[in-house]
Image (cartoon, rainbow, N blue to C red):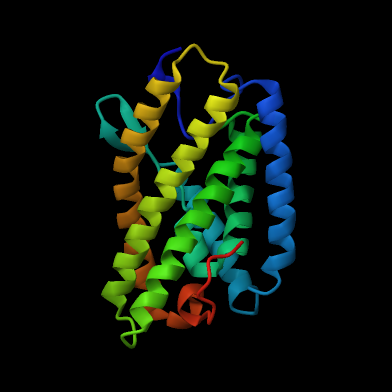
Amino acid sequence: MTVDHVAMHMSDGIVNAPTSLLFGVIAVAALGFCVVRARTELDDRAVPLAGLVAAFVFAVQMVNFPILPGVSGHLLGGALAAILVGPYTGALCIALVLTVQSLLFADGGVTALGTNITNMAVIGVAAGYGTAAVLYALARRRGDVPVPALGVIAFIAALIGTICAAMGFVLEYAMGGAAPVSLGAVLAYMGGTHALIGVGEGVITAVTVMAVARARPDLVYLMRSTRTEVPV
């Protein structure tokens, strides 16, 4: 196995069993917390939108775009989901997508499902929404936030969320990497490629959020939420 085979959708055997088990427990605990807190985010508008967001993320994750020769990436969707439907509901949407992909399409290993959910549905969503919430709160101090500014916020949030999710992968590999690839190589590869992937993620997230904000601003959770703190 070479570093080119190391991808965000972790497959079985990339990390050892104890590490997979540990992050499986973390993922279950985090999702349980999200289930409880998502009740504060869901209303008559958010419930159908959450389904649409999950379907959209599932569809676009099936499409890879080229990053470098021999390297491709796809939308993670964490920041997008969180900005539109809230961080807790967003995390559940991404976790659902990852579970379906793992069980039905063999995209990501079953034993690695906990690590993948931790990276993309927990770390990616928390970092992405935390960034968006802070930037939006700062922008609101100057008055109403125009749609283009919201797009910039969404772009930065998606970029940071993607990089943080990649660093979660590196942390897990450092704790229990089982593939014959050095930690330094994994760090360089994941950090470099996902900085580029994050740019594509940011563009898609910004365009989507701006489109929804122009058509139905009441459906953008970040805009209608009065909270400015980073969710725990």
Q: Is residue 231 found left or right of 59 in the rendered image?
A: right
In the depicted view, which residue is nearer to us: 102 or 164? 164
Task: Residue at 26%, 73% (x, y): give it.
Answer: 148
Displayed quadrant of residue 23: top right
Residue 192 point in image, percent of width and height? 31, 34
Residue 80 point in image, percent of width and height? 45, 60
Quadrant (top left/top right/bottom left/bottom right) for the C terminus: bottom right
Task: Residue at 40%, 42% (x, y): give it.
Answer: 74
Residue 158 point in image, percent of width and height? 39, 55
* Residue 57 seen from this side: yes
Q: Compared with residue 150, is residue 218 higher up or lower down, i.e. above or below?
A: below
Q: Compared with residue 116, is residue 151 higher up or lower down, i.e. above or below?
A: below
Residue 19 point in image, percent of width and height? 66, 28
In the depicted view, which residue is nearer to us: 75 or 178? 178
* Residue 9 seen from this side: no
In the depicted view, which residue is nearer to us: 226 or 62? 226
Tally the numbered discs.
0
Q: Is residue 118 found left or right of 74 in the rendered image?
A: right
Task: Residue at 50%, 50% (x, y): give it.
Answer: 124
Q: Compared with residue 22, is residue 130 higher up or lower down, i.e. above or below?
A: below
